[in-house]
Amino acid sequence: MKVLLLGVALGLLYAGQGEAQLLLVPFSGEWKTHYIAASNKDKITEDGPFHIYVRHVQFHPNDTADIDFYIKSDGECVKQHVTGVRQKKLVYDVEYAGQNEVEILRFSLNTIIGHIHNVDEEGKETDMVALIGKSEQISKRDFRKFKKQASDKGIPEENIVNFTDNDDCPEE
Ligand SMILES: *[C@@H]1O[C@H](CO)[C@@H](O)[C@H](O)[C@H]1NC(C)=O
Ligand SMILES: *[C@@H]1O[C@H](CO)[C@@H](O)[C@H](O)[C@H]1NC(C)=O
């Protein structure tokens, strides 16, 4: 597993753009949200557009990625689907609650840390860092890496929302 991961990481360093995309395809599958930090916390608290419970991420070989997730609206789980279009190596453009640039900062076979820069319909900008995982538990080490990325983006620690235990949306 470690050797495979190292191969993937090295591959990404040296691969051209198209090849980098192909290498992401195996990371497709069931994912769940563990933590999101945001410069504007109201974007990620309940009823906010980024109070997101991820279910499935599919990386396609044609430079697109599909994400299925739920948000909470007035206590109800509302199903959402977005498609990202890759604009450079590990950066996707996504239209959702405004315009987003989503950059994959770190990934392994069971965690992805991403940075989202959102410009909403009113032109308000928000930086977010999200940690999604393949399993129920996140290691302390991965959580530290997530916290470091959030603080590097200037997001205060009190603006972290822990999604691990409050997910009561359908499993599928
Ligand atoms: C990319 O591939 C996916 C899966 O085959 C397909 O659903 C989607 O329509 C394609 N998108 C574009 C822009 O070609
Ligand atoms: C997040 O919530 C889970 C489940 O309640 C808990 O086990 C974990 O320690 C929490 N994380 C932090 C950093 O407090």
Image: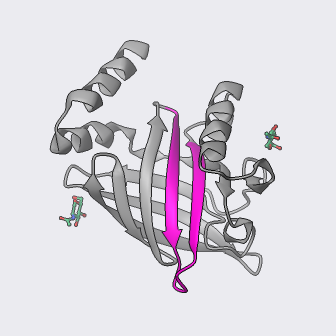
Q: Main secondary structure of the magenta part?
A: strand
Q: Is residue 172 visible?
A: no
| Relative to 19, residue 166 above or below | below
- Residue at the extreme bottom: 122
> What residue range appears in magenta?
110-132
Above or below, 2 against 15 in this view is above
Query: Residue 94 placed where, x, y %?
Result: 39, 67
Outermost residue toward the top in this view:
3
Q: Residue at x 49, y 47 (%)?
A: 30
Quadrant position of residue 28: top left
- Decide which of 22, 156 is in the foreground and name it: 156
Residue 28 drawn above or below residue 71? above
Counting from the top left corner in percent of width and height, residue 72 is at 69, 72
Task: Please tell me whether residue 115 belongs to the stretch shown in magenta.
Answer: yes
Occupied quadrant, residue 26: top left
**Quadrant location of the C terminus?**
bottom right
**Residue 23 horizontal/vertical position (percent):** 27, 36
Give whichever of 91, 169 is nearer the camera.
Answer: 91
Whether 5 is drawn above or below 66: the answer is above
141 or 172: which is nearer to us?
141
Q: Is residue 60 left or right of residue 131?
A: left
- Does 164 lie within the magenta span? no
Which quadrant of the figure shows ligand 1?
bottom left
Residue drawn at point x = 51 percent, y = 85 percent: 121
Percent of width and height locating residue 38: 66, 59
Give the left or right position of residue 81, taking residue 145 as reference: left
